[in-house]
Amino acid sequence: MADLPVAAIVRIAKKSGAKRVGRDAAMTLSAKAEDYIAQLTKEANKLAIHAGRKTLKEEDVELAAMSA
């Protein structure tokens, strides 16, 4: 089960141009977003560790997103 709220996913989809969003589509978008966030976090964490830190910083996430 996805942790991201379906209402937030629907709101984002509508702001991005979707007229209507079915619950199944919202659930799939939520799952895909969580997969992306997990992968991005793994890459950002590698960068933080390489820099000798345990804490993720904005720069780690930005660099990880550029390489994704």
Image (tube, grey):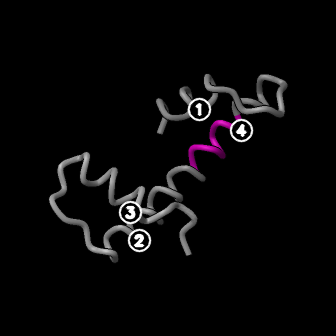
Q: Is residue 66 above or below residue 40?
A: above
Q: In the image, what residue type sits under mark 4? A: Asn
Circle 4 packing at 10 Å, graded few (<14), some (14-19), many (20+), is many
Q: Is residue 22 above or below residue 42?
A: below
Q: Which residue is mark 2?
A: 27
* Residue 18 image position (x, y, % from top left): 19, 56
* Residue 31 image position (x, y, % from top left): 47, 66
Contact between marks 2 and 1 (CB within 8 A): the answer is no
The CA span between labels 1 and 3 is 21 Å
Q: Which residue is mark 3?
A: 29
Nearer to us in this view, 56 or 4: 4
Circle 3 packing at 10 Å, graded few (<14), some (14-19), many (20+), is some
The CA span between labels 4 and 3 is 24 Å
Mark positioned earlier in the residue sequence (4 or 3): 3
Q: Main secondary structure of the magenta part?
A: helix
Contact between marks 4 and 3 (CB within 8 A): the answer is no
Q: Who's the residue at 74% across and 30% down the image?
A: 48
What span is colored magenta in the figure? 39-46
In magenta stretch: residue 17: no
Q: Secondary structure at mark 4?
A: helix
**Left/right of residue 45 with respect to residue 14 in the rendered view:** right
Q: Secondary structure at mark 1?
A: helix
Q: Which residue is mark 1?
A: 61
Look at discs 1 and 3 and give the one toward the viewer.
3
Nearer to us in this view, 24 or 35: 24
Disc assigned to residue 45: 4
Q: In the image, what residue type sits under mark 2? A: Met
Mark positioned earlier in the residue sequence (1 or 3): 3
The CA span between labels 2 and 1 is 25 Å
Contact between marks 2 and 3 (CB within 8 A): the answer is yes
Contact between marks 1 and 3 (CB within 8 A): the answer is no
